[in-house]
Amino acid sequence: QVQLVESGGGYVQPGGSLRLSCVTSGIIFSIYEMGWYRQAPGKQRELVARLISGGTTNYADSVKGRFTISRDYAKNTVDLQMNSLKPEDTAVYYCNVVQMTSSGYRTAYWGQGTQVTVSS
């Protein structure tokens, strides 16, 4: 069974930094995609950043230049370094992994979420 466990969320003042980490277990097929999404109160879940097999990296426009996603291929972990945080970054952040079988069938998995609060 695939499990994702996030850590690193918390409370930080505007301009501060946080680093989120996601540890995976139970992955038995290749990973097509690893990334981070977030959901603020009253809003839909949105992409923050993701790494797609083959080398593509996507960032939300709102975080470009401030957030950096990285992956440890040996450990199947994915981190999100968040700098220059703003109050509008406040949300629950979710780790996402898309596993793909040899026949191309993809399955997405989600972590339980970690709260990030940016406030003075």
Image (tube, grey):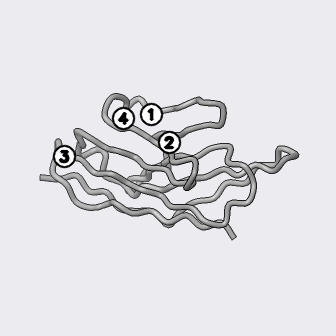
Q: Which residue is denoted by mark 3 in the rendering?
A: 16
Q: Are marks 4 and 1 in contact (CB under 8 Å)?
A: yes
Q: Earlier in the sequence, mark 2 or mark 3?
A: 3
Q: Earlier in the sequence, mark 4 or mark 2?
A: 2
Label 3 to label 4: alpha-carbon separation: 14 Å
Residue type highlighted by circle 1: Ala
Residue type highlighted by circle 4: Val
Label disc, if present, on residue 60 of the rendered structure = 1
Q: Residues within 10 Å of mark 1 (few under 14, many from 20)?
A: few
Label 2 to label 1: alpha-carbon separation: 6 Å
Q: Are marks 2 and 1 in contact (CB under 8 Å)?
A: yes
Label 4 to label 1: alpha-carbon separation: 6 Å
Dot 2 falls on a residue whose secondary structure is strand
Image x and y of residue 82, in percent: 31, 44
Image x and y of residue 45, in percent: 50, 50
Q: Which residue is denoted by mark 4 in the rendering?
A: 63
Q: Which residue is denoted by mark 2 in the rendering?
A: 47
Dot 1 falls on a residue whose secondary structure is loop
Label 1 to label 3: alpha-carbon separation: 19 Å
Q: Which residue: 84% across, 47% down?
A: 102
Residue type highlighted by circle 3: Gly
Q: Residues within 10 Å of mark 3 (few under 14, many from 20)?
A: some
Q: Are marks 2 and 3 in contact (CB under 8 Å)?
A: no
